[in-house]
Amino acid sequence: MAKLQEFLAVNPEDSFVQHALALEHIKLGNDAAARVLFEQLLQRDENYIGSYYHLAKLLERNGATDAAIAAYEKGMEMAKKAGDNHAYSELRSAYEDLTF
């Protein structure tokens, strides 16, 4: 985790590193820090599609159902625009599990 923080300090707009750091926070049970990182990342780089799924799952886990649904929907929209059918399918499946 320290190495990821170091990399991010050097290049604060590195979406891959920020995403990886958020996942590490989740592993440590620090959903609040992970949420901040995911939201900052997606605000800056809405095309980083993998973060929508992880953010939505985090929101779902924390009882923020409406926010999770919004994250899944935005992720599906961005995946469709990018032609990423695999990501779209994963997001849609999780979305349907939550909403049906």
Image: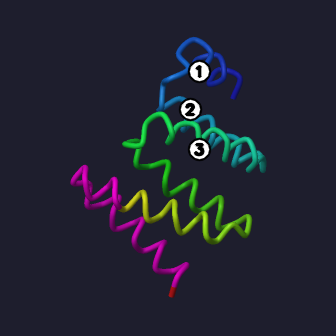
Who is closer to the viewer here, 38 or 7?
A: 38
Q: Amino acid at mark 2?
A: Gln
**Residue 89: x %, y % from top left:** 34, 68
On the image, the x and y values in percent for residue 20 come to 56, 37
Which label lies toward us, 1 or 3?
A: 3
Q: Which residue is mark 1?
A: 8
Which residue occupies 58% across, 37% down? 40
Q: Earlier in the sequence, mark 2 or mark 1?
A: 1
Q: Earlier in the sequence, mark 1 or mark 3?
A: 1
Q: Residue furthest bottom?
A: 100
Q: Which mark is residue 90?
A: none
What residue is rendered at 78% in x and 50% in y?
Answer: 29
Is 85 covered by the magenta stretch? yes
Can you identify the residue that label 2 sits on? 18
Residue range in magenta is 77-99
Q: Is 78 rendered above or below residue 11? A: below
- The residue that mark 3 highlights is 39
Picture quarter containing residue 23? top right
Amino acid at pointer 1: Leu
From mark 1 to mark 3, how far is it between C-alphas? 15 Å
